[in-house]
């Protein structure tokens, strides 16, 4: 067993040594390199893609060939070299220590990025002499890469080496997960902040219905996912979301253009890198799709490469976030001094230089073009050498200085003026640089503070830029606002009062909504099966309001309030009660006063002719008492008019009950007198002696006293009181009297009804008694009217709304009172005033019957 183990171990060691030698046999050399006491690595995308190759499998494949030279990435790499030279010339940072660099090209490819990272870690040795491949790294930090996907691959691979990776352009929010990427830092803000800023931008301009487009890579997919999550939290909706990449098939691009043309959203948010949009924008231009408002991420919004006149017709008025534009002192002159001769080993790069600047590398005597590449950077003023617009160069510059400050804080040595060395410079390890990077906090020469948070991210600052056309016809990126994540919540995004040029060429903000905003007075009702941004506006119901735009529900007004016609404000309800000033109230008052006057007139007539046979024959005492009670019946109706109060509520019902009982008691007494009078005419019957005037008055007051007792109990137990009836109507309040104790109220009405029925029955029985003036007939008719009025009153009272309920009650009181007055007293007044010849005892004792009223 031990022998087998030793054999396997020997084979493994031999194989591992062979692998190490194979890896080190043909090491990749950097494009740019400079020796120094401390070496830092750089990985940049000098080319946009790798040339297609078909291996023959007959020999070892050669190095990859790259194509599509990216001059901007070339300038970023030279910015790294510029920063290193500036640090070496500065005695305040790393005194006595020189900084060198090795810069590789990853050709925008993950495999080549990994190859470059391995080359930086392993160095250029042909083989290794140690037992294993593990050995100290030649570099202390790596600056790179442009895209998030290769950055993720490299950072993950180098994690065990504890080599810090500082990216100047990788913005994927996923890289902020410190548990997964503990060695990662960046000088460009995370897409988390960019997504949040874009969501605030969309909300600021009132757009609720959006299209979304992203690059099909970690940068685009993660960024657009974070953006969609942010806008959904704000209540905004995305109509469609698609991804695209630089080599998308023609069919996919055509399908995407068709979706964008058919979509109802007029704003499209694009989270992509500029190279992925070229083919799409070209197709949109060919199909004349120029009505969309483009909102861009920093990956393309400030790209001079896209800023052509053809693209501008599609992207006109585009708005988006860009890295803050900072001019680094001396850098423009440094970059303009670059010559192709500085890179003699890279023929490909030289040819790309020719293609980029449209120049010739030949001598001036042999040049066939208008300009030589030697003079091209000086004479050609274009987007590549316009350093203020190369916003990312500042991030490269800050990354180099961050590494320098990390090393400076580690060494903490005094510069030796004798030999210019630092005693402990050879003892530094990458993990020590990593730990010091977490504590870096410095200010650049141009005043920008640089530090990293716990996730390795800087403070997020963006410029809000707008694509505009100058008067000279040049496309320019105008800064119209700022975003700063270090500011308090709600104040991070602000405009700088610069006019924005929108897609239609005017200053009016375009609309992009699925449904128009619901105005105050309405509420949103989401359409079934649609996003929340697609809704109908429903008018608030009666008694409900909405006082803000796009309200999702209506607020109920308080009980004493109602909604106005616009349903956007609660106003006090109208208070309804029968008043003296309205026409109906005035008519009832007139009828009441008229009835009182007529009653008093009749009483005056009766008093003046009290000695005449007609008055004497009809029980003058009860007649006067009846007229007195009728006067109060007419007057008590006035207590029902006006605003109800505690006293008026108690008065109106008790006065009504007592006066009507007094009135009916008098009529009942008169009926009994008629019956007793005719019975007394029989021989031997002296019943009238037992039912004289005193007994009659006593019976009237006794019957009335019962009603008074009921009313007293009513007032003591639960008296009537004023209430606001808000249930009958939604738009007004009925001010009315609550009955209090319903039992006693029905007792009052029941007692009146009982006396009325008794009176009617007795009068009906006495109607046939012989006499020329039989009062029982008139009493019968009057009680018939009285009962009919109050029977009709019941359904009318129940069905009448509001103040009309009181009016019906008053009308019943007045009608029944007028019925009693005219049916009982009109025939007598007719004889007294118009037929005095019949006002004799002889006529009253005659056999002829008078006419009824």
Image: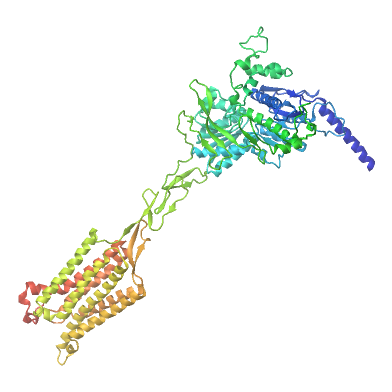
Q: Is residue 145 left or right of residue 514?
A: right
- Quadrant hosting residue 367: top right
Compared to residue 651, the image places residue 161 above or below, namely: above
Q: Quadrant of the N terminus?
A: top right
- Spot the residue most to the front: 418
- Quadrant hosting residue 846: bottom left
Q: Can you see residue 571?
A: yes
- Where residue 517 appears, as percent x and y from the top left, is 45, 42
Q: Can you see residue 851?
A: no
- Where residue 304 appears, as percent x and y from the top left, is 58, 24
Compared to residue 612, the image places residue 18 above or below, namely: above
How is the protein colored in the picture? rainbow
- Where residue 571 appears, as percent x and y from the top left, is 37, 53
Q: 166 or 668: which is nearer to us? A: 166
Q: In this view, does 322 lie to the left or right of 537?
A: right
Report the label total: 0
- Spot the residue most to the top: 365
- Spot the residue most to the bottom: 684
Compared to residue 575, the image places residue 707 above or below, namely: below
- Where residue 581 appears, as percent x and y from the top left, is 24, 59
Q: Is residue 843 left or right of residue 225?
A: left
- Spot the residue most to the left: 837
């Amino acid at each position: 067993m031990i022998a087998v183990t030793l054999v396997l171990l020997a084979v493994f060691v031999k194989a591992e040594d062979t692998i190490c030698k194979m890896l080190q046999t043909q090491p990749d050399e950097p494009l740019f390199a400079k020796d120094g006491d401390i070496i830092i690595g750089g990985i940049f995308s000098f080319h946009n893609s790798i040339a297609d190759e078909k291996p023959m499998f007959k020999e070892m494949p050669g190095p990859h060939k790259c194509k599509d030279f990216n001059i901007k990435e070339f300038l970023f790499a030279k910015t790294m070299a510029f920063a290193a030279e500036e640090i070496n010339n500065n005695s305040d940072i790393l005194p006595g220590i020189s900084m060198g660099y090795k810069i590789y090209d990853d050709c925008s490819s993950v495999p080549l990025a990994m190859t470059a990272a391995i080359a930086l870690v392993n160095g250029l040795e042909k083989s290794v002499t140690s037992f294993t491949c593990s050995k100290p790294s030649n570099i202390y930090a790596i600056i790179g890469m442009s895209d998030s996907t290769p950055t993720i691959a490299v950072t993950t691979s180098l994690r065990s080496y504890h080599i810090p990776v500082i990216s100047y352009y990788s913005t994927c929010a996923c890289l902020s997960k410190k548990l997964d990427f503990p060695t990662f830092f960046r000088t460009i803000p995370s897409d988390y902040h960019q997504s949040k800023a874009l969501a605030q931008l969309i909300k600021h301009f009132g757009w609720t219905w959006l299209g979304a487009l992203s690059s099909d890579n970690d940068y685009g997919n993660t960024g657009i996912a974070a953006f969609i999550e942010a806008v959904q939290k704000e209540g905004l909706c995305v109509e469609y979301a698609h991804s695209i990449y630089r080599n998308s098939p023609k069919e996919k691009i055509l399908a995407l253009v068709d979706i964008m043309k058919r979509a109802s959203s007029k704003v499209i948010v694009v989270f992509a890198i500029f190279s992925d949009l070229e083919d799409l924008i070209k197709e949109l231009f060919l199909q004349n799709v120029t009505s969309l408002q483009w909102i861009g991420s920093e990956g393309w919004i400030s790209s001079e490469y896209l800023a052509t006149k053809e693209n501008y017709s599609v992207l006109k008025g585009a708005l988006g976030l860009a890295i803050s534009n900072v001019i680094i002192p001396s850098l423009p002159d440094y970059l303009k001094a670059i010559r192709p001769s500085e890179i003699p080993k890279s023929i490909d790069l030289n040819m790309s230089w020719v293609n980029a600047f449209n120049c010739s590398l030949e001598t001036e005597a042999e040049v066939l073009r208008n300009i030589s590449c030697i003079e091209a950077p000086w004479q050609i003023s274009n987007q590549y050498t316009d350093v203020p617009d190369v916003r990312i160069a500042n991030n490269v510059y800050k990354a180099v200085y961050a590494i320098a400050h990390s090393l400076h804080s580690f060494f903490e040595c005094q510069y030796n003026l004798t030999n210019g060395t630092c005693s402990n410079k050879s003892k530094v390890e990458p993990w020590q640089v990593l730990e010091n990077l977490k504590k870096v906090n410095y200010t650049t020469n141009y005043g920008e503070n640089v530090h990293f948070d716990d996730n390795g991210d800087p403070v997020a600052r963006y410029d809000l830029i707008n694509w505009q056309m100058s008067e000279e016809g040049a496309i320019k990126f105008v800064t119209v606002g700022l975003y700063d994540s270090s500011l308090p919540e709600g104040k991070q995004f602000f405009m700088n009062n610069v006019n924005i040029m929108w897609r239609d060429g005017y200053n009016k903000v375009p609309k992009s909504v699925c449904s128009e905003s619901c105005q105050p007075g309405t509420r949103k009702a989401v359409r079934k099966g649609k996003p929340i941004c697609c809704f109908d506006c429903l008018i608030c119901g009666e008694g409900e309001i909405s006082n803000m735009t796009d309200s999702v529900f209506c607020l109920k007004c308080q009980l004493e309030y109602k909604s106005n016609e616009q349903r956007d404000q609660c106003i006090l309800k109208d208070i309804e009660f029968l008043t003296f000033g309205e026409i109906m109230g005035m008519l009832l008052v007139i009828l009441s006063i008229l009835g009182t006057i007529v009653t008093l007139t009749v009483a005056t007539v009766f008093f003046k002719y009290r000695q005449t046979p007609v008055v004497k024959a009809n029980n003058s005492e009860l007649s006067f008492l009846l007229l007195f009670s009728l006067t109060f019946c007419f007057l008590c109706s006035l207590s029902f008019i006006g605003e109800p109060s505690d006293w008026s509520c108690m008065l109106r019902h008790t006065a009504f009950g007592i006066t009507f009982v007094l009135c009916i008691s008098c009529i009942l007494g008169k009926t009994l007198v008629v019956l007793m009078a005719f019975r007394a005419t029989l021989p031997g019957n002296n019943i009238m002696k037992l039912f004289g005037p005193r007994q009659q008055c006593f019976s009237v007051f006794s019957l009335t006293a019962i009603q008074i007792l009921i009313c007293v109990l009513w007032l003591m137990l639960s008296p009537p009181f004023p209430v606001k009836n808000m249930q009958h109507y939604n738009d007004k309040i009925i001010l009315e009297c609550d009955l209090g104790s319903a039992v006693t109220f029905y007792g009052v009405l029941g007692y009146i009804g009982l006396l009325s029925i008794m009176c009617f029955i007795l009068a009906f029985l006495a109607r046939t008694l012989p006499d020329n003036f039989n009062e029982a007939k008139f009493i019968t008719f009057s009680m018939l009217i009285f009962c009919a009025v109050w029977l009709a009153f019941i359904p009318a009272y129940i069905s009448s709304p509001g103040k009309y309920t009181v009016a019906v009650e008053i009308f019943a009181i007045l009608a029944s009172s007028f019925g009693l007055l005219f049916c009982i007293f009109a025939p007598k007044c007719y004889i007294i005033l118009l037929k005095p010849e019949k006002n004799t005892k002889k006529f009253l004792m005659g056999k002829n019957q008078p006419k009824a009223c």
